[in-house]
Amino acid sequence: MKESSAFRRYGELALGIAMMALSAFYLYFTTTIRVRGNHPINSRTVPYILGGMVLVLAVAQIVSGIKHIIAANDEARQLNLKIVGLSIKERQSVLPIILTFVFIIGYAIAFDPIGFVISSIGCMFCMMMLLTPKSVKKPIMFFIISVVVALVVYIAFRRGLNLSLPRGLLYNVPL
Amino acid sequence: MSETFSLLYTGFAGVLTPFSLLLIFIGVGVGIVFGAIPGLSATMAVALFLPVTYGLAPGNAMSMLMALYIGGVSGGLISAILLHIPGTPSSVATCFDGHPLAAKGQAAKALGVGIVFSFIGTMFSILALMFVSPLLARFAIEFGNFEYFAIAMFSLTMIASLSGNSLIKGVFSGTLGFMFATVGIAPIDSAKRFTFGSVNLMSGFDMLTVMIGLFAVGEIISAARDAGQESDEVVTQPDMKNIKGFGFTWAEFNSQWVNTIRSSLIGIGIGILPGIGGGTANILAYSVAKNQSKYPEKFGTGIIDGVVASESSNNSAVGGALIPLLTLGIPGDTVTAMLLGGLMIHGMTPGPRLFVEHADIVYGIFAALTVATVFMLIMEFYGLRIFVKLLSIPKHILLPVIFCLCAVGAYGLNSRTFDMWAVILFGILGFGFSSFKIPIAPFILGFILGPMAETELRRGLNLHRNDIWPLFKSPICLFFLGIAFISLCITAYKQIKRQKQTDLTHTLSGRTLNKFGEEEDPTI
């Protein structure tokens, strides 16, 4: 039986709600901007306009999201689709997406203390292993590529372009 | 006129040095690879190479960036013809006839036609750029704050035309871009806005972190969605044996003049309009070529007319997009937005004064574009086998390497990890945009043009003692505000019409079909 995912049905409405929350957040902090002088158009004017615009767009998006849910439910009923939280493809992609976020955020955290070379090797290797289909996974080759790329980039930027990248744990290693 | 030729001579003298030629050679080669590999783009290539240009002289830096731009736009034809996947949005229409031609065993001919007419289209647009820009700059030098505000407002209305299927999402994207641009110190009165006590946020978000995050990191996170899945891409191998010249006859070449000139003019015109670019130009030129053809039924079956229309128009949009960038400081598309950043990194502010203060760089850019176009012609055809091999490098290896380069690019801006975090933030935002089918291009326009509109309006008001009426007295302001209004009305009408069509084709999977019966991707 074909599936109709909740993300597809409620995503548009969720986006509208997120837009409204963003608008409220932005408008609130607009009121805290300290303005100087007595100009008719000051540093708060544009943020007020932008916050107001997002508020109007959020209302329109919520209306559109509700219409979308009604249409999707009708269609699911007509086509006898099984209503699920996430479709099979969506479920399969959740873990890789979360892991990608973990690798990227971990890389940014490790960049300064551990250094560019080691953190880049780790991040590139993990991402290659994650993104590659099982049948063509070659850990040794991926590791060699990661090491070569990290070293070449480091040396090229440090020696060629005088861009100082963090050395971290390799501080005493002459590179 | 003699002054123009003298400046051009100086420009070419600066570019025709061994080091500059080497940079252009590398730039064109890398650009072609980025253009050819689906998922990578000219924007990404320019973003990644901006840090490389930090240490170069401004002339050499701009030569390299222009070479990347030229290579990136034309490289898309390789995958469009051999893979039936456009490497860039500019090559969508190249697929329609290029791939069927390749499927008939004439891949070398399809590529030869694409490459030669890319070359001709680019040369047309460079000529337009060389001779139109200085005139426009001379005219624009008289513009005041209100005139620039009116131009920025007109350009911002283009957000609506980039909105894809949903006007709400397109306008939201543009507004969000403008919102992010308000972070930091406000223009005129230097009030702190949305800094939350952070010193790093005082200078706002750097344009490059926004671009790298949205385009490169966003793409990498999106790739995780298909992680572990086998690729079913099949590269058609062109048979280069027994191929004379570029694989087509003089008679075929001569039969395409009208098509080439018409498509190039469409490309230049579309390129000049802010925010549209080659992605629209190639489809429009293809449609016009089909409508004007004596044999429209043959389009889509593998005839060279379709390839000529698409490739000459998308490449001519390059020169077109550079006209508003250099003369008014307004980027025509996302790559030119990157180039704007490139000019600023080297202490130059695009606009009419650039032609006065840095004429050597401007004419150096013209010369670099010309040389890069010649390199593109030679490298793309004679180095085709190498590029075809590179097409087979899997994305699961390329994307992590690109991410690492993005991190270096971001860190190199100010040698601080804050910019890396900003790249990650915008990467997550780019992934969110792709998940909710929100177009990215309006965000970029809002981020760049929004602050320009605010600053110019407030400066103008300061200058005229808070009197807004000079804005409505200036004929230039009235002209731009008028066409901004007309453009908004036309877009709103088209959106309502499209919405009715979309309702018909909308399915539960959220997929919609364009007029060519293909799935649309509004995130480009």
Image (spheres, rainbow, N blue to C red):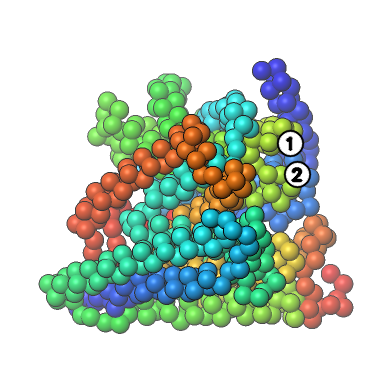
* B262 sits to left or right of B493: right
Question: In this view of the protein, can residue A1 be seen by the observer?
Answer: yes
Q: What number is the disc on residue B103?
A: none
Q: Is residue B113 visible?
A: no
**Which residue shows up at 62% across the image and 80% down it?**
A106
Q: Residue B237 location in percent, x, y?
A: 47, 48
Q: CA distance from mark 1 to mark 2?
A: 10 Å
Q: x, y (%) of residue B196?
A: 62, 75
Say which residue label 2 marks. Answer: B58
Identify which residue is drawn at 41% across, 61% down: A53
Label 1, on which residue? B358
Q: Amino acid at mark 2?
A: Pro
Which residue is drawn at the image coordinates 32% and 42% (left, top)? B490
SS under mark 2: helix
- Label 2: few (<14), some or many (≥20) within 10 Å? some
Q: Residues within 10 Å of mark 1 (few under 14, many from 20)?
A: some
Q: Quadrant of residue B184?
A: bottom right
Query: Which residue type carries mark 1?
Result: His
For the residues bearing labels 1 and 2, Cβ distance under 8 angstroms? yes
**Residue under mark 1: which chain is it in?**
B
